[in-house]
């Protein structure tokens, strides 16, 4: 069975099926905004790579503990990776995933992959919120 090639347009369609509005910015990057994060989707001939960045900064008093939690989460989550990053001078986190799409994917498969990814990403962001790691400033 041949599956359709994964393109930005196919990803937009799958996101739309999940109720997520996405668009391409002036640099050609596909993205979507959420209340607590911004996601970017990169499609090439082999992979769909997603980066979702939390739009809160980590308070200085919690940075060391946040790094420990990141390491713990990376051992526990079934897929993806949580990484500490700095955006405009503010420390925050990024949840990323690489999906092998070299052989294409059905719309249903893509929806399932995206849904699972977002459940993990927002579980991580919720965990950081509940631990009180967020500083008032947004990144």
Image: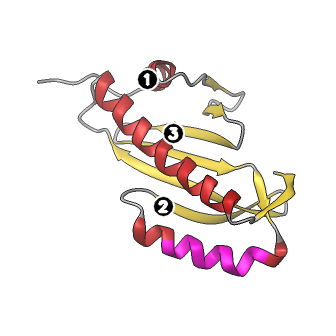
Instruction: Say whether disc 3 or disc 2 marks the residue closer to the N-terminus.
Output: 3
Image coordinates of residue 110 in percent, x first then y, are 35, 31
Of labels 1 and 3, earlier in sequence is: 1
Residue furthest out toward the left: 1
**Residue holding disc 3:** 42
Assess whether residue 120 is covered by the magenta stretch.
Answer: no
The furthest residue to the right? 137
x%, y% of residue 130? 67, 60
When asked about the image quadrant of residue 68, the answer is bottom right
Disc with the residue nearer the chain's start (2 vs 1): 1
Q: Residue at x 63, y 31 (%)?
A: 32
Q: Which of the pair 62/25 is nearer the observer?
A: 62
Dot 3: within a 10 Å radius of its alpha carbon, few (fewer than 14), some, or many (20 or more) residues? some
Q: Give me the C-alpha separation between circle 1 and circle 3.
A: 14 Å
Q: Which-is-in-front pick, marks 3 and 2?
A: 2
Residue at 53%, 21% in the rendered image = 19
How far is disc 2 from disc 1 in space, using C-alphas?
A: 22 Å
CA gap, disc 3 and disc 2: 16 Å
Identify the residue under disc 2. 81
Q: Quadrant of residue 48?
A: top left
| Part of the protein shown in magenta | 62-72
State the residue position of label 1: 14
- The image quarter in which residue 100 lies: top left
- Where residue 96 appears, x then y in whole percent? 51, 53
Q: Position of residue 18 (x, y in %)?
A: 48, 24
Where disc 3 sits, the SS reads: strand
Residue 68 painted magenta: yes
Residue 116 versus residue 93: which sits nearer the camera?
Answer: 116
Q: Residue at image x 60%, y 22%? A: 21
Q: Are marks 3 and 2 in contact (CB under 8 Å)?
A: no
């Amino acid at each position: 069975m041949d599956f359709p090639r994964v393109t930005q347009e196919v990803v937009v369609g799958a996101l739309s099926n999940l109720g997520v509005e996405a668009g391409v910015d002036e640099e050609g990057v596909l993205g979507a905004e959420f209340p607590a994060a911004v996601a970017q989707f990169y499609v090439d001939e082999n992979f769909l790579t997603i980066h979702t960045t939390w739009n809160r900064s980590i308070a200085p008093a919690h940075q060391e503990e946040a790094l420990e939690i990141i390491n713990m989460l990376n051992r526990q989550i079934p897929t993806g990776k949580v990484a500490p990053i700095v955006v405009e001078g503010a420390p925050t986190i990024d949840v990323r995933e690489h999906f092998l799409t070299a052989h294409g994917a059905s719309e249903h498969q893509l929806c399932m992959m995206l849904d699972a990814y977002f459940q993990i990403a927002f579980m991580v962001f919720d965990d950081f919120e509940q631990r009180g790691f967020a500083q008032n400033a947004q990144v």
